[in-house]
Image: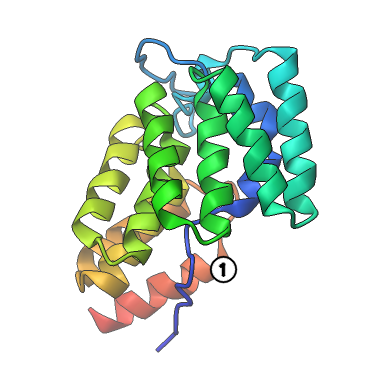
Amino acid sequence: MQIKKVTKRGINYPLLAAITVLLAACASGPQQTAEISAGGPSANPYLSQARKAPAAAREGMEIARRAYEAGDMAAAETQLMQITERWPELSGPWLNLGIVQSRAGNAEAAEASLRQAISVNDLNVFAWNQLAALLRDAGRFDEALQCYQEALARWPDYSDAHRNLGILFDLYLQQPQKALEHYRAAQALREEPDKQLAGWIVDLERRL
């Protein structure tokens, strides 16, 4: 049987580097239905809200990114806290602050920041996914399940959320049939087949 490594699975720390994408869609706004592209998955509703963040906010995020990549979590956190204080209406910086705090081992602060990212813009499916993984690692499985479901309710074609929900069902909730369904959904939504997912799917098909 294939062993799945689960430590910090779903906490996508390199997401901090995607400052342009996150800041482009971090302002709050009305919920909207994502457009469906011909023959492909629906658009991410959070990114579909794209609005250009202030130049100073983008500059601050770049400083935070460099600190993060240098391993200076304290400097990255300080910079991101300054951004959230000046532009509390931007969801992306709250998300990245939560990622940095989680990486630094401050789960309580990370949870608060991720929840604030969602409060500012509940279409931020990245924040729902990160929060779910944080809760899962804390053993709060029912809450993690709800957060993954919230992410997928907003974007049914979110491959990473399907993958992580599959892991939750597979390894933590002992519901292999549901795990298989989400692994298959995650694989179907990938631009290219994921070898690890393929292995997990084969493993579950053999067990069921």
Quadrant of the frame with the N terminus: bottom left
Which residue is depicted at the point 33% across and 61% down? 136
Whether residue 122 can be seen here: no
Give how far across and how far down residue 195 sits, in percent: 56, 68
| Image-based side of 133 in relation to 194, left or right | left
Residue type highlighted by circle 1 = Lys
In the drawing, does residue 159 fall left or right of residue 64? left
Q: Residue at x 51, y 55 (%)?
A: 102
Front position in the image: 164 or 185: 164
The quadrant of the picture occupied by the C terminus is bottom left
**To which quarter of the image does residue 174 belong?**
bottom left
User: Could you tell me which secondary element the residue under label 1 belongs to?
Assistant: helix
The residue lying toward the viewer, choosing from 36 and 19, is 19
For this view, does 142 lie left or right of residue 90? left
Residue at image x 49%, y 33%? Answer: 40
Q: Position of residue 4 (x, y in %)?
A: 45, 78
Q: Position of residue 165 (x, y in %)?
A: 33, 56
The residue under label 1 is: 195
Q: Is residue 142 above or below residue 90?
A: below
Question: Residue 137 in the image: x percent, y percent?
Answer: 37, 65
Sort mark 1 into few (<14), some (14-19) or many (20+) by Cα contacts within 10 Å.
Answer: few
Report which quarter residue 64 is drawn in.
top right
Residue at image x 74%, y 41%? 65
Whether residue 168 appears in this view of the structure is yes
Question: Looking at the image, which residue sits at the far bottom?
Answer: 1
User: How many marks overall?
Assistant: 1
The colour scheme applied to this rendered structure is: rainbow
User: 168 and 81: which one is in front?
Assistant: 81
Image check: 29 left or right of 171?
A: right
Is the residue 122 above or below the residue 182 in the image?
above
The image shows residue 142, relative to residue 3, as above or below, that is above
